[in-house]
Image (cartoon, coloured by chain):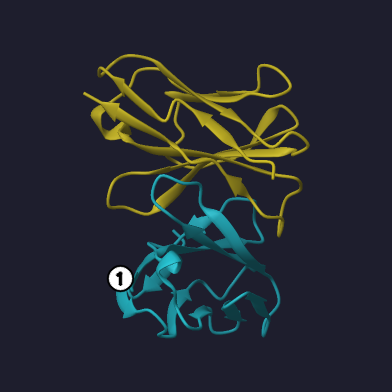
């Protein structure tokens, strides 16, 4: 059974704060790591797909790093805004197939 | 922007009844998936489908479950005889290719089994 864990489970920050959360995943049989942003009652929205060790990706004020050797990825949000409030999910894909194994998510709440 | 659509958004059924959850994947995508999230738990993979057949399935996807692509646009998940523990949010997803390609998700169907 693949174990993908995210921390923290939830996070409350003030508008303008920068924040980061962690996704840990198996370091063996790695193929890709996906990050999604999920607002209640909406579709999970893909943020990044990361495949290479040392990869860094950026989309606006959100960025992510990847360490496949130790099995972790960080998601950073610089200068959080209330509209960044959502659950952030990471999902691991092994080289054995196409399925995504999800972490439990980090629920971010940004107060104005 | 193209999107994956799922209907209905909420389905209520009695234990033992059959349900069909419907999805319209993005039109040029070739790979299709079902996932589910039981309340308070992680999102779990159920099945992937390519070239009109199941390519992978999890232990959850037992004989009570089946998938079908009855025409060129719809992708359905059927649960033959629902149980209380089938209550969950069911997500459909599609991707153009496999591997590092993005899986695009629908907004989900909440299934409540009474």
What's the chain of the residue with tag 1? A
Q: Quadrant of the N terminus of chain B?
A: top right
User: Which tint is chain A?
Assistant: cyan
Chain whose colour in the figure is yellow: B
Q: Which residue is drawn at 58% across and 73% down?
A: A28
Classify B101 as above or below A9.
Answer: above
- Residue bearing the label numbered 1: A10
Residue B19 placement: quadrant: top left
Side (left or right) of B5 relative to A81: right
Residue A67 visible from this viewpoint: no
Q: Which of A25 and A110 is in front in this view?
A: A110
Side (left or right) of B6 relative to A32: left
Q: Provide residue B10's location: percent of width, then percent of height.
A: 36, 29
Q: Provide residue B14's location: percent of width, then percent of height.
A: 25, 17
Q: Provide residue B89's location: percent of width, then percent of height.
A: 38, 39
Q: Which residue is drawn at 65% across and 77% down?
A: A58
Q: Which residue lies furthest to the top in this view?
A: B17
Within-10-Å neighbours for mark 1: few <14, some 14–19, many 20+: some
Q: Residue furthest front?
A: A112
Residue A82 placement: quadrant: bottom left
Q: Which residue is drawn at 38% across and 15% down?
A: B18
Q: Provide residue A65's location: percent of width, then percent of height.
A: 59, 81
Q: Residue at x 71, y 55 (%)?
A: B101
């Amino acid at each position: 059974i693949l174990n993908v864990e995210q921390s923290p489970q939830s996070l409350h920050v003030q508008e303008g704060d920068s924040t980061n959360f962690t996704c840990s995943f198996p370091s063996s049989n790695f193929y890709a790591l996906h990050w999604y942003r999920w607002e209640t009652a909406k579709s999970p929205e893909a943020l990044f797909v990361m495949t290479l060790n040392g990869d860094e990706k950026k989309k606006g004020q959100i960025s992510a790093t990847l360490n496949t050797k130790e099995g972790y990825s960080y998601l950073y949000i610089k200068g959080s805004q209330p509209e960044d409030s959502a659950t952030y999910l990471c999902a691991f894909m092994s080289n054995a197939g196409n399925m995504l194994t999800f972490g439990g998510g980090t629920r971010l709440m940004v107060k104005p | 922007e193209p999107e994956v659509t799922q209907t209905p958004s909420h389905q209520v059924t009695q234990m033992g009844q059959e349900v069909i959850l419907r999805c319209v994947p993005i039109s040029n995508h070739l790979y299709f998936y079902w996932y589910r999230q039981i309340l308070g738990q992680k999102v779990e993979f159920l099945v992937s489908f390519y070239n009109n057949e199941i390519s992978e399935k999890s232990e959850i996807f037992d004989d009570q479950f089946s998938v079908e692509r009855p025409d060129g646009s719809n992708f359905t998940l059927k649960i033959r005889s629902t149980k209380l523990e089938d209550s969950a949010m069911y997500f459909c997803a599609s991707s153009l290719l496999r591997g590092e390609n993005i899986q695009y998700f629908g907004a989900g169907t909440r299934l409540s089994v009474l």
